[in-house]
Amino acid sequence: MRTLPLFVAALLCVPARADLFTAQLAYQKADYERAFKDYRELAELGQPVAQYNLAVMYANGQGVRQSELNAYAWATLATEGGEARGKSLADKLRPRLAPGSEKIAEDIRAPFSLMPKVEDDQDSRTGCHLLKADSDYPLEARRQGIQGEAFAEVVVMPDGSTRNPRILYAVPTGVFEPAVRTLALHLRYAPREAGARPAHCRLMYRFEISGGARYPELEKFVRVEHEKAEAGDTEAEFVYGMLLAGFPQLGHHPSDAVPWFLKAAQGGSPGAQYVLGSSLLLGIGCHCEENKGEVWLRRAAAADQSSAQVTLAALALRGTPDTASTKLAAMWLERAAASADHDGMYYLSALLATTPVEQMRDPQRALSLLAKVKADLSTDPTVFEVRAAAQAASGAFADAVRSERRAITMAGRLKWDLAPLNERLAHYESRQPWYGDLLGL
């Protein structure tokens, strides 16, 4: 069982900063200030028991100024999360509220209504109608009998070709990511009207060997993690969710994993917050709810979950970002790159090479970052386009021409529209830099 321990080690996360036990202990000791702080922290993550207890403390004025309005808001949130006592408390408080208070309570609760609607995943976004998909099982993974899944996002151009495949998460980690990046570049989607904006589409690759070897002791491991998860162990909740989502031999759908991701996210696991946020953002195993997804991603990013930081940066750079959005993206990417995150370094290199914001441009650093990830992206023409842009920005136009020509040769094999690449080549041949978005964000 070689890969399973590595998978588990990759999932272990920072423990929650507060938990129900310590909050309840503080409450029993009449340390209401501490209890309120801990309950509030958990309640803001959507933990329904904490939301109910917070409502009680607001109603009684324990550790906080008494407020029936706030008590009502948190009681209704607890009800939404499945805490039956929340409804009883809300029903008791409602008649006491002044006219119009329910609307104010709705405004109070809106930022914390983070429960996902779990259902079969759907993909109704424009431009995500896949015409052709080839799936080659990585040879080494097949030889070792390794099965799993990878979830990715890809940018689809108006002509149906793909750009910038990004792995959202994969199970087991470190096995299928390079293959999925290469496979995603060969996809073809339905063309759209000329001038349409790039579409962002999700992919799920499931690698399953018919009659293939099973991980020794997998069933026992799953049972143990399930028992720990049922007992409220935050790390086990996350690991068990990932097992359900990513091991085909367990026979589960991604929607089965979402409730466990939610529990772990509410318990303060940055990894679970990222996976849940990505699931909500893209509709993986649940209804697509971008606003809730971004809330969970921000929580994960604030706890230095690097994939969440990259996702928030990509969202900030989407469309035609202004200077403030570009600086926000750079901040998140700097934090991700500082932890050696693959996509963090790649996205930051592209930003430093091609940003129109002159004071943020740093082509030499862009080349240095790109060198650290280029081997993993050797089949992607965009890598050489980023290098060409950085070389041109630093005045090395002959090198930029060579890099851009290599990108054009590679893109031709993928049947990309070469007009934008040839336009950039003309800039470099004329000894002019080029600035803009190469990643299709």
Image: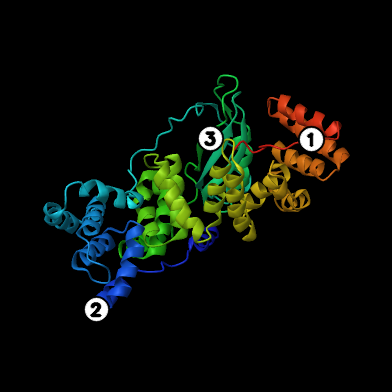
Alpha-carbon span between mark 3 and mark 1: 25 Å
- Residue in the image at 78% along x and 51% along y: 364
Q: Secondary structure at mark 2?
A: loop
Q: Secondary structure at mark 1?
A: helix
Check the image and report above or below for 309 versus 58.
above
- Residue in the image at 64% along x and 60% along y: 338
Question: For mark 2, does the 10 Å Cα neighbourhood hold few (<14), some (14 to 19), or many (20 or more) residues?
Answer: few
Return the x and y of residue 292 as percentages of the image width and height.
39, 46
Alpha-carbon span between mark 1 and mark 2: 68 Å
Q: Are marks 3 and 1 in contact (CB under 8 Å)?
A: no
- What amino acid is at disc 1? Glu
Quadrant of the drawing holding the C terminus:
top right
Q: Are marks 1 and 2 in contact (CB under 8 Å)?
A: no
Nearest the viewer among 346 and 90 is: 90
- What amino acid is at disc 3? His
Residue assigned mark 1: 404
Check the image and report above or below for 431 versus 12.
above
Q: Residue 136: name its quadrant.
A: top right
Residue assigned mark 2: 30
Is residue 117 visible to us here? yes
Q: Secondary structure at mark 3?
A: strand
Is residue 247 visible to us here? no
First in sequence, mark 1 or 2: give its number.
2
Return the x and y of residue 328 as percentages of the image width and height.
58, 50
- What amino acid is at disc 2? Ala
Report the side of 21 relative to 123 (left or right).
left
Return the x and y of residue 390 as percentages of the image width and height.
77, 44
